[in-house]
Every structure is written in structure tokens, then in C-alpha cells.
Amino acid sequence: MKRELQDPLKILVTGSRGKSSLVRLIHSALVANGIKAYGRITGVLPRELTPAGEVQILRTNGGHVEEMRWWLSSLPHYAEAVVMENSAVAPELQHLAARWFSPQLTVITKVDPDHQEAWGPSEEDAIRAIAMGITREGAVFLGPGLDKKTYLQDILKSKGCSLHTTLLPEGSSPDFRENNILTALGICRYLGMDIELSEKAIRGTPPDMADFRTFPLGETELAFAFSANDIDSTRDLFGMLGWSSDETILLYNHRRDRPVRLESYRDWMFSNKWSSVFITGDRPWFAWAWKWYRESKDLGELLSSFGEARKIFGCGNVAGLPLDFILEREELQ
């Protein structure tokens, strides 16, 4: 597959979770097919994906929706394909990415509740917000299981969108990374790309720095699930480990601008007989969370204070202590 230089392929990735990971997979497949592809992700750190690798986008201030427009204006004229993550949060700003970008294909990863302070607490709130970024009569590729979301389907059909679905192997229940891989492969088929070449590149793409994985820390294991963002994904990741809750320390990293997320985890924190529960990061507002709060400036030191031979499940938010922790480990490698 080859694009004319004056007509770059443009793919916009939106949804509640997994956007950055999916952009990286699609970009890898495009480059493997000999296409001069560029991508932009926010994720843990804002980065530009080029045919030669990843480059961090340096900010003088915090993230802003205008960064998407600035980045698009900085692309080289010879770019043959562009894959961009929609980084807008406020519902009224969701449409800007599509207006500035005019994508030929929009991909929706997931519609789980997220950014509850801006979107509202329910899945339907998330769907309404995400759908505001979908152009009328556009081609939309749906992540696994989204073809069964009736409310989402009704909105997209009312916009006259043509819908394409990620097909899962019969009887399978893939994990979040495999879901993204299958979605990326479905997009490659839709675009007419070499599937064998694409799959090799996609499966060979290493996990992003803050993707879910376990770290050995001496005799202790840390399950790094801080990027999950929503309670359902977090539950699924914990279930994948096969750990018993009564042998696990639950560690929640809190952000003061995400109080609704903390509240959404409350029942899960209470319903399991955890070995211990700790909340760190910003001091929570909720009185029920105060007894579990542990102030810390260094995640490694906090983990060490729990003792040896522990299983620790980290969740909530990656910004702050977990991000500092993962960046320090990246520098040491």
C-alpha cells in the first residue's frame, strides 16, 4: 500500500482508554509497509512517532488541546500517513481534532467511564462525549465489543457513519493488549495493507513504558496498573494476575483533579479482603479515604516500606509518583 504525497492517509484515534497504545501499533504497521508515517500520542508523555522512532514533545506548560493543531502544522510535506490521538477532554472540545485533521478513518477504542469530572459518571456519558468528536458520514472503526453497545451504535448511525468492527476469534477473551493488536490488524485489513508484514510489526512493537506489567523488586512483585483509568479495566487486570486479594497490597495513586475516579474505586477497595490498602499521591478530600492515605515523595521508598516478599497492585492514576518511578527505571536501562 502506498499513498500519494499530496494525499496523506489520516487516522484519528479516540475513546476512553488505549488510544496511545493503538496509535503506536498502527504507526508500526504503516512504517513496516514502507509508508512515511507520523503519529502523535499523549499517554504518559507526549510524543511524536516518526519513521525513525519516537521523539518526546517538550512542553513549556501543561497539555492543551491546541497542541494537536500545532503538531499537525509541523508535519513534513512528504508525510504519507498521519495517525493522531484525540487528546481533548471537555465534551465541547471533542470535535476540534476532526475539524483540524479531517480524518479518512476514526477509530474508537473503548467507551468505559473516564474523565468523570468532565464527562459524567456513566458509560452513556462517556459515549455522548466521545461521539461529539465523530464527524458525520465518516468511516468509523470500532474496538472489540463496541458493536454490541446499542447506545453508541444508535448515535453513530444517526450521524450516517459507516461502521467497521474488530472481529474476535470465536470463544476468545483477549487481554487489553491483544484487543489493541486485533483492532490494529483489522484496520490494516480495511486499508488493504500486507497483513503478514503488518502483524509481524504490530506484535513486535514493545509495550509502552506505562503499559500494564509486573516488576520484580527483590522478592516483591509490583503489578503496574496505574494507567488503567477505570474500575472495570482495573478489575480485569487484577483478575489476569491470578493473585488472591488477601495476599495483595492495594496501592491507589490519587490525583486531586480526579476525585470521582477515586470514589468509583471505593466499593472495590471495601469489597475485597486486601492484605492492606494504601492511598498515596495527592491528599484525598473524602473522609473515608483518610485512614488509608500515606504521604510519599518517592514510590520506590514507599514500596520498600511495605517489607519483602509482597505482592503489590498499583492502580488509580499514573501521573505523579508512578510516572517518576517508571521514568527512573527507563533511564537505568
Image: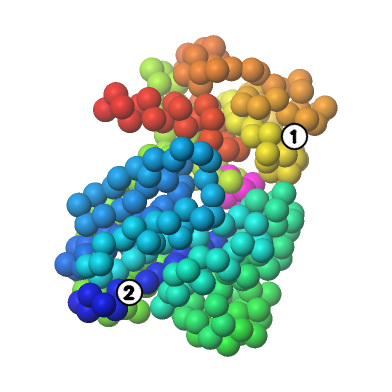
Quadrant in the picture for the N terminus: bottom left
Q: CA distance from mark 1 to mark 2?
A: 48 Å
Q: Is residue 288 in sight in this rendering?
A: yes
The reply, left or right, for residue 99 in relation to residue 34 is right
Q: Which residues are magenta?
A: 230-234
Q: Nearer the viewer, residue 240 or 144?
A: 144
Give the residue type that dot 2 points to.
Leu
Quadrant in the picture for the C terminus: top left
Work out which residue is located at the far right of the displayed protein and give it.
287
The reply, left or right, for residue 201 in relation to residue 167 is left
- What residue do we see at 51% from left, 72% from top? 99
- What residue do we see at 53% from left, 86% from top? 137
Report if residue 232 lies within the magenta region.
Answer: yes
Badge 1: residue crowd in 10 Å (few <14, some 14–19, many ≥20): few
Q: Is residue 165 in sight in this rendering?
A: no
Residue picked out by circle 2: 9
Q: Position of residue 171 (x, y in %)?
A: 47, 68
The mark tally for this picture is: 2
Residue picked out by circle 1: 270
Q: Position of residue 181 (x, y in %)?
A: 37, 61
Q: Nearer the viewer, residue 67 or 158?
A: 67
Q: Nearer the viewer, residue 305 or 81?
A: 81
- Rendered image: mark on residue 139: none
- What residue do we see at 69% from left, 21% from top? 293
Give the residue type that dot 1 points to.
Phe
Element class at badge 2: strand
Q: Main secondary structure of the magenta part?
A: helix
The reply, left or right, for residue 208 in relation to residue 142 is left
Q: Position of residue 167 (x, y in %)?
A: 43, 74
Badge 2: residue crowd in 10 Å (few <14, some 14–19, many ≥20): many
